[in-house]
């Protein structure tokens, strides 16, 4: 695990603005939005994630959605537990790591891991949520199971990099309601 963490620290990262410029985050260098054909193959249903990024080989994919569903930090654990319960119904006995909370700069986040089999390789799936301006950011990270140690560290670095972009008015209003400060986008 130490070797994997050292490799991640040496890796180059790129800054990405996504979800209608409400979120700023870092992804490994070279990750990009896949072509429509790849998206259709990886997500063969009508409703697709709002943001999708993949590595150059398209074996590692991360998605982000900013839902209209309200979510505040106090609700994160119960929300991620409910999502885990639904996944466990779809894929019985697939949960690898139970739902848990972890703190990132943008706020309290929840995540869990499940595993599915595949033709080429078994896949690990991390599901995660985070309140963004009191709305639920729901995301997923998919990669070959054999790379779980390295990719868990990559995901944590991605989640730690998330910065909520809010205007001064939004920030003042949010502080009045919740007492929580969010980082404003001061980058140019």
Image: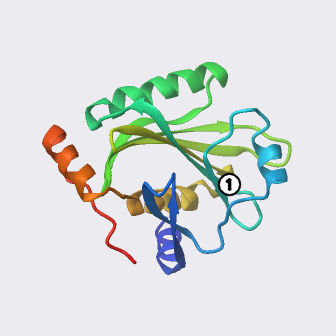
Instruction: Indicate the secondary structure of the residue bearing disc 1.
Output: helix
Residue 178 drawn at (x, y percent): 17, 40
Residue 89: which quarter of the image? top right
Q: How many marks can you see?
A: 1
Nearer-the-camera pick, 73 or 179? 179
Q: Residue furthest front?
A: 169
Question: On screen, 73 above or below 106?
Answer: above
Question: On screen, 96 above or below 59?
Answer: above
Taking the image as shown, residue 18 lies to the left or right of residue 69, namely right
Residue 151 drawn at (x, y percent): 57, 58
- Image quadrant in which the C terminus is located: bottom left
Nearer-the-camera pick, 101 or 179? 179
How was the colour assigned to the protein in this rendering?
Answer: rainbow
Residue shown at the point (74%, 59%) measured from the top left: 34
Residue shown at the point (68%, 54%) measured from the top left: 146
Q: Residue furthest top?
A: 89
The residue that mark 1 highlights is: 146
Residue shown at the point (66%, 25%) measured from the top left: 91
Dot 1: within a 10 Å radius of its alpha carbon, few (fewer than 14), some, or many (20 or more) residues?
A: few
Residue shown at the point (67%, 49%) measured from the top left: 145
Residue 176 drawn at (x, y percent): 13, 42
Taking the image as shown, residue 126 lies to the left or right of residue 31, namely left
Question: On screen, 135 above or below 62?
Answer: above
Residue 148 drawn at (x, y percent): 59, 54
Question: On screen, 146 above or below 113?
Answer: below
């Amino acid at each position: 695990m130490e070797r994997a963490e050292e490799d991640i620290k040496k890796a180059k990262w790129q800054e990405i603005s996504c979800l209608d410029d409400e979120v700023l985050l870092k992804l490994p260098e070279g990750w990009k939005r896949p072509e429509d054909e790849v998206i259709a193959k990886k997500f063969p249903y009508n409703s697709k994630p709002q943001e999708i990024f993949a590595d150059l080989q398209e074996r590692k994919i991360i998605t982000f959605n900013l839902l209209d569903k309200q979510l505040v930090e106090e609700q994160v654990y119960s929300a991620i537990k409910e999502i885990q319960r639904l996944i466990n119904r779809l894929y019985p006995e697939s949960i690898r790591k139970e739902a848990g909370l972890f703190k990132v700069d943008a706020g309290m986040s929840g995540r869990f891991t499940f595993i599915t089999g595949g033709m080429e390789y078994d896949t690990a799936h991390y599901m995660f949520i985070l309140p963004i301006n009191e709305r639920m950011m729901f995301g997923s990270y998919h990669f070959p199971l054999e790379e779980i140690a390295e990719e868990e560290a990559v995901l944590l670095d991605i989640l730690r990099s998330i910065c909520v972009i809010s205007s001064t008015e939004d920030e003042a209003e949010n502080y009045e309601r919740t007492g929580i400060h969010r980082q404003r986008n001061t980058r140019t």
